[in-house]
Image: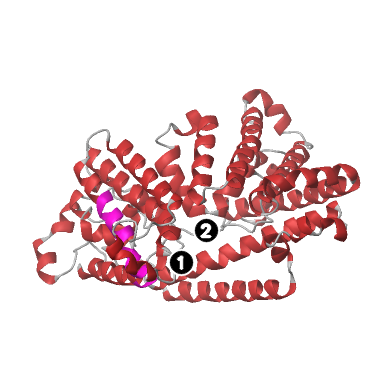
Amino acid sequence: MAERATLGAYHSPRGRQEGTIVVQGQKAKPESGTYIYMAFGVCLAGYLHQASFIFPLVLSLLNFGLTSASLHSGMPVVIWTSNWILLLTARLSRGGSFGSINHNLAFLDAYQGPLQWQISYNLIVLRHISFAMDKYWARSQTTDLDAQAPQQNTCKAQQKQSLPMVDYNLWAYLAYIYYPPLYIAGPICTFNAFAWQCKRSSAVQCRQVCNYAVRLACSMLLLEAMSHSLYFNSITRYSLWQKYGAQLQLTAVDMGIISFWVLMFMWLKFLVIWRFFRLWALADGMDVPENMLRCICNNYDIEGFWKGWHASFNQWLVRYIYVPLGGSATRLLNIWLIFTFVALWHDLEWHLLGWAWLTCILFVPELGIKWLFMQPSMAFLRNRWYFRHICALGGCCNIIGLMAVNMVGFVVGTDGIAPFLKQCMLEPSFVLCSLAVCFSAVQIMFEIRVMQQRQTKVPMATQQQAKTLGHQVLTGKVQQGLVNY
């Protein structure tokens, strides 16, 4: 059973003497662990970037200095503004060069390393902001930190738990920024969660790590098989359907199939990447958020899709942007700011901005319809047998919209959507068949959600109780949760 640490346990004289952090009822990690993480992280980043590693290191130290010197009420504005300016500067200058600083240093430009530093700097910026905001909120905390210590050793509980100010030090900061398993691609972990686990023994069991490794190996084999047998990603990467579309005479069905398999390839590719680095972190005893919570084919609403696609990034956005900007009270405005931020954070490309804004255009009606159906005056409709099919029709439209938006962002771009829509207009049968297939798929997704609710709500239920819950689902009492999912 996870035990919470007392405030005094962080600074116990005995803990310092023995080189450990004393935690009540739980074995603690040695204090040297943070320094080891920092040393290995700096060495890894130094190898990846070689001479240019000096740029992200200096920027990280600058962010730490701003955070330490600006703990007044305007500190969030200073941190966000400075990190955005530095990120845009790094992107526009393509990492800069030593020769632009001094011609005598130009020879260092030949030592860039296997990974350009500006490519991974977007993740570093997220860690800069996480450390700064967590420290700011810890400094602004007026209640007892010990009273708010999380009762459960979960990622979400650790993210929200402020630490004593002494834990927001330079060594922990550098260890967090350059932590080897998460440095290249994530998943994204907040500073609070990272520092909390640095001081406590791992709750990750060896059996869990082994099972996770087996699942990752299966995913890697599937990705390898897809790469050697399905060439749709190469077709779009080299714009073959735009160069030779007239000769190939591609129909709307052909373009739709290509787009579907490209999205499937992207999902599986990122799943393998993120789970590989998460497995590395789990093997090290660091439990970080999971990405790709669901298969891409098991999503029928935009809100649920983005919560499960890059889940750790979604949690970061909620904590550091969505909630500070007002949360659900200003949701309709927040989604435009958040998706614009996400697009610019990924890269400075017009097609990404188009992807972000089209997503918001689809998101707003979904939120409005969900709000409408959850009103007390709509209770009569939620109890009708056909309400499930109304929801399925809405989910069907969401799936079509999500595929179209992601085609703009990652397949055909903003220039290719018009020819695709024109082709769809010429083949109405393709549109009708797509709607029918998606409608049937949403019905299956509903049943999957119902099964998950049964397992969550009545894990020890009798057969009669399970039947009762299933009847409630079909009569709409649990379908209310499907609308608000």
* Residue receiving disc 2: 291
**Crowd class of label 1 (few under 14; some 14 to 19; many from 20; radius 10 Å):** many
Q: Residue furthest top?
A: 377
Circles 1, 2 touching at the beta carbon (< 8 Å): yes
Q: Quadrant of the N terminus?
A: bottom left
Q: Is residue 87 left or right of residue 347?
A: left
Residue 386 spot, x, y in % from top left: 79, 37
Residue type at tag 2:
Asn
Q: Is residue 217 left or right of residue 327?
A: right
Kindly identify the residue that appears in the image at 12 percent across and 60 percent down.
Answer: 12
Tally the marks. Answer: 2
Q: Is residue 192 left or right of residue 32?
A: right
The one nearer the camera, 236 or 102, is: 102
Q: Quadrant of the C terminus?
A: top right
- The spot of residue 264 in percent (x, y) is 68, 61
Task: Specify the principal SS of the magenta part.
Answer: helix
- Real-space CA distance between mark 1 and mark 2, rounded to the nearest whole angstrom: 9 Å
Residue 60 lies in magenta, yes or no? yes
Q: Seen in the image, is 346 located left or right of residue 447?
A: left
**Residue topped by disc 1:** 278
Magenta span covers which residues?
A: 47-63
Where residue 328 is drawn, which disc sits there? none
Q: Is residue 365 above or below residue 468?
A: above
Residue 324 visible in the snapshot: yes
The answer to whether residue 27 of the structure is visible from this angle is: no
Q: From what the image shows, is residue 202 above or below residue 65?
A: below
SS type, badge 1: helix
Q: Earlier in the sequence, mark 1 or mark 2?
A: 1
Query: In which quarter of the view is residue 418 placed?
Result: top right
**Which residue is at the far front?**
103
**Label 2 SS:** loop
Q: Say which amino acid is labelled 1.
A: Arg
